[in-house]
């Protein structure tokens, strides 16, 4: 998992409330569990004018010109600005996979569905909670300024605007530690790899029949 400490990036809008996980990555794309390759189908039903199918060459599909991620001013965006209850619906982990694979490193919204929020941290994506007033201010600035960027400082737990304004946010200390160090559940376990090996060696000596010896 990629670590996140300080990230400066272009911001793209998802200006609607209650965006569910089926909108983030539709159900027909859930057959794979590789964690990668979902970016082209992120927001598939909003992004394209046809119906997407697994394995389809998305570069040949007709784009919806009204959808923000298809517009030139938002190309290369790595911060998604959203409304309340983002990531509601089913608990599919493919949703943060698709967002991360597309290139997003952080999301800013007033609230998230709990399971989606937890899944983001496990997959290297930072979901930031700001007040509705702060999110509205960011939307207004985003629409008014082409090329609008934000600096996300997880170490200091701050969202910083180019004009110097700072919006603080809070993240659980354990989740913050994992994301700062790029540690998912497997990475955390592997920190104790030597202790695990020692334990397995002791168990093999004490109960060799468990190991087929």
Image: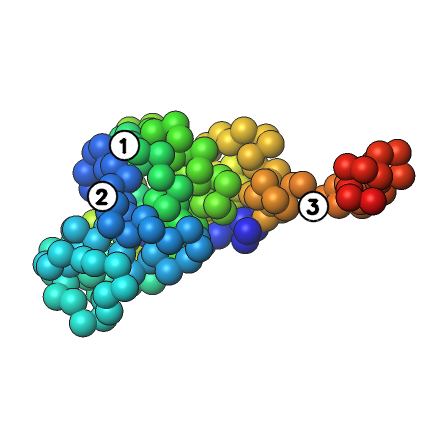
| Alpha carbons under labels 3 and 1: distance apart | 32 Å
Q: Quadrant of residue 68?
A: bottom left
For disc 1, the marked residue is: 89
Q: Position of residue 96 (x, y in %)?
A: 39, 45
Q: Residue at x 12, y 66 (%)?
A: 62
What is the x, y in percent for residue 108? 36, 39
Q: Report crowding for label 2: few under 14, some 14 to 19, many 20 or more residues within 10 A (C-alpha).
A: some
Residue at the disc numbered 3: 190
| Residue 61 vs residue 180, the one in the foreground | 61
Identify the residue at image location x=59%, y=40%.
Answer: 185
Front one among 165 and 180: 180
Q: Nearer the viewer, residue 85 or 42?
A: 42
Q: CA distance from mark 3 to mark 2?
A: 34 Å
Relative to residue 164, is residue 197 drawn left or right? right
- Is 51 placed left or right of 1 in the picture? left
**Crowd rating for badge 3 (residues with CA inside 10 Å; few <14, some 14–19, many 20+):** few
Residue 154 seen in this snapshot: yes
Q: Secondary structure at mark 3?
A: helix
Q: Is residue 135 above or below residue 10?
A: above
Q: Are marks 2 and 1 in contact (CB under 8 Å)?
A: yes
- Name the residue tied to disc 2: 23
């Amino acid at each position: 998992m990629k670590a996140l400490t300080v990230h400066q990036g272009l911001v793209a809008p998802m200006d609607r409330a209650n965006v569910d996980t089926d909108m983030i990555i539709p159900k027909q794309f859930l057959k794979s569990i590789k964690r990668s390759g979902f970016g082209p189908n992120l927001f598939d039903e909003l992004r394209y004018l046809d119906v997407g199918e697994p394995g389809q060459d998305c570069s040949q599909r007709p784009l919806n010109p009204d959808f923000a991620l298809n517009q030139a001013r938002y190309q290369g965006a790595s911060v998604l600005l959203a409304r309340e209850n983002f990531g509601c619906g089913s608990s599919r982990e493919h949703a943060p996979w698709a967002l991360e694979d597309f290139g997003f490193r952080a999301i800013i919204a007033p609230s998230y569905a709990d399971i989606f929020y937890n899944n983001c941290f496990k997959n290297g994506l930072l979901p930031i909670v700001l007040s509705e007033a702060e999110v509205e201010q960011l939307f207004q600035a985003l629409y008014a300024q082409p090329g609008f960027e934000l600096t996300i400082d997880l170490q200091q737990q701050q969202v910083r605007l180019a004009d110097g304004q700072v919006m603080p946010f809070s993240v659980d200390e354990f989740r913050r530690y994992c994301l700062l160090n790029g540690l998912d559940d497997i990475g955390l376990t592997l920190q104790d790899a030597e202790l695990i090996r020692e334990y397995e060696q002791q168990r093999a000596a004490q109960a060799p029949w468990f190991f087929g010896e």
